Amino acid sequence: MPEKMKIMHIITRLILGGAQENTLLTVEGLQRRSGCDVCLVTGPALGPEGELLSRALRNGVNVRIIDSMRRAINPWRDLATYRAIRRMIKEYGPLVVHTHSSKAGILGRFAAKKCGVPAIVHTIHGLPFHPYETALKNRLYIRLERKAARASDAIITVADAMTRQALAAGVGEPPRFQTIYSGLEINKYKPLSAEERDKFRGELGIPRDAAVICKVARLFHLKGHEFLLSAMKRVIEAVPSAYLLLVGDGILKGQLEKITKSIGISDRVIFAGLVPPDDIRKHVGLSDVVAHCSLREGLARVLPQSLLCGVPVVSYDIDGAREAVIDGETGFLVPPESVDELANAIIRFLTDRALAARMAEAGRRRCLEMFDSEKMVNQIAAVYERILRMKGIA
């Protein structure tokens, strides 16, 4: 093997999001290893969700931007992106190409295979096909993902649930899959002191003695904000001091603000907007409960983030949620789209603080072991090394 293992990561865009944070932490971790030379290929960080590109550049990541790489399907842009990826692979000469997200995953793997890259790895952070997508798009995504899987030496998933769903759709074969939980900089997530909690609440205009429910997610389709807003009506009736803190921005902000007014809770809902990733601890930590109501998600990072901050969680029981939240032990899982059960679980935590503290502490211990980013990087590096050894390169 050459003195330096050249590794190219490819992701569609570096917005604020779980897949993007996972990818950037992986790249940063690999570039700290003496035997790795890493570059990151991405498209423009477009959209209202915020971006991680500035952090990547600030931390010295070798970033290469392909202007034509966008999330939406566009045959002409996608062809241009495929050609650009091939040019970059030929220029950089990686031993490993590791792709993330559906668009970059499909085009990047096809390009890497065409260029004869020795090790081709893909991470499934969330599958592009799902029950809320149209049948036509699902058929297209499944067909492309099946083909791209055949070009993959290994497929990493962020939850066992993703492996099961992929295999059920005929994507890949069991020996190619490995679950590696999405790592966090766990030292950044710890409970707030009472003084910090009061200070941060004051900055947001939240009373010290309020019962605060927090949700961290883009204000976007399938993130489930409408269910949580409906549940809040009941929560406020049961716990009159309740406030809802929504962290994130997106195209549905205006629509969600209208909903809060129509059901009469606008004075109890705070739209915090985009916050820097380092401020997630602040917003989660000042809360009493974190609710996660997405209808699809590989394994939402806010679940371990919250538990590491000592805050109990209520989540819809979707995808990999149950791998972070053990129902009745480290939090509550409720059926997707259920408003009543979501409200009941939140109320239970707000009215039984001893239960909330006990579950949060159990969750914190579990997450410290499962979601360490250094552990994630070591496991990913081991996947590369295994593939290269099998091909006689190591």
Image: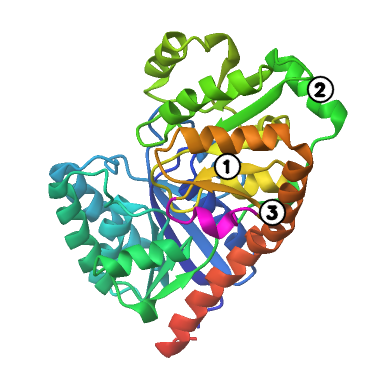
Residue 219 shows in the view: no
**Residue 186 badge:** none
Which of label 1 and label 2 is nearer to you?
1
Q: Earlier in the sequence, mark 1 or mark 3?
A: 1
Q: Position of residue 260 (x, y in %)?
A: 47, 14
Residue range of the region highlighted in magenta in the rendering: 318-328
SS of the residue at dot 3?
helix
Q: Which residue is mark 1?
A: 314
Q: Are marks 2 and 3 in contact (CB under 8 Å)?
A: no
- Gap in angstroms between the C-alphas marked 1 and 3: 12 Å
Q: Main secondary structure of the magenta part?
A: loop
Q: Are marks 1 and 3 in contact (CB under 8 Å)?
A: no
| Residue under the image location 47 percent in, 50 percent down | 317
Q: Earlier in the sequence, mark 2 or mark 3?
A: 2
Residue 87: name its quadrant: bottom left
Mark 2 Cα within 10 Å, few/some/many (few <14, many 20+)? some
Say if the magenta span includes residue 363: no
Q: Position of residue 77 (x, y in %)?
A: 19, 43
- Gap in angstroms between the C-alphas marked 1 and 2: 23 Å
SS of the residue at dot 1?
strand
Q: Amino acid at mark 2?
A: Asp
Q: Which residue is mark 2?
A: 198
- Gap in angstroms between the C-alphas marked 2 and 3: 24 Å
Q: Which residue is mark 3?
A: 363
| Residue under the image location 32 percent in, 65 percent down | 166
SS of the residue at dot 2?
helix
Q: Amino acid at mark 3?
A: Gly
